[in-house]
Amino acid sequence: MIVNPTELDIDVYKDRDYSKTFIIKDSEDALLDISDWTVESQIRPTYSSDSLTAQMVVDIVTADSSITTSLESAVTGVIDASTPIDLNSTTTATNLVWDLLVTTTGGDRFSLITGVCTFHDTVTREVT
């Protein structure tokens, strides 16, 4: 069981597809057996928030010990990115938090990865 999660910040863009693949290895750089893992990943405003911003789609490939998290543009299109990046900025983003939670068939639950999700507004959109 992993005790301390890896910290990794991610960037997600409004109205864009997002995907990130992680290869899971042990401390000796060997692929870890993840065949008994169930994995889920969520984005929330804060670590203690009951409000769910997005549930990521998670795909596990046990043959190469990979876990891919993704969001479709239909999901990212409805997330608000309204906080100015800095004073007087016209560029906006919202800092959220995310994690990758593992549950083993033995019932162990641990965060594999956790971090800040900076959600960015975008410029180019479909013209209606």
Image (cartoon, rainbow, N blue to C red):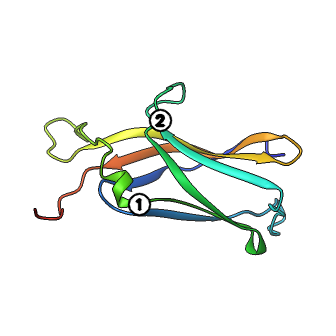
Q: Is residue 105 left or right of residue 59?
A: right
Looking at the image, residue 97 lies above or below residue 76: above
How many neighbours does mark 1 have within 10 angstroms: few (below 14), some (14-19), or many (20 or more)? Answer: some
Q: Which amino acid does label 1 sit on?
A: Glu
Residue under numbered circle 2: 52
What amino acid is found at the position of numbered circle 2 in the picture? Answer: Leu
* C-alpha gap between disc 2 and disc 1: 16 Å
The residue at the point 77 percent across, 75 percent down is: 63
Identify the secondary structure beneath mark 2: loop
Residue at position x 85%, y 40% from top? 107
Q: Is residue 34 left or right of residue 45?
A: right
Is 104 situated left or right of 111 in this image? right
Question: Furthest-left residue in view?
Answer: 128
The residue that disc 1 covers is 72
Of residues 25 and 63, the one drawn nearer to the viewer in this rendering: 63
Q: Is residue 96 above or below residue 37?
A: above
In the image, farthest residue toward the front: 128
The spot of residue 4 in percent (x, y) is 73, 41
Q: Position of residue 111 (x, y in %)?
A: 69, 42
- The percent position of residue 40, horizontal first and vertical second, equals 63, 48
Q: Which residue lies furthest to the bottom in this view?
A: 63
Quarter occupied by residue 24? bottom right
> Helix or strand or loop: what does disc 1 sit on?
loop
Image disc number at residue 96: none
Residue at position x 23%, y 44% in the image: 92
Q: In this view, does 73 lie to the left or right of 57?
A: left
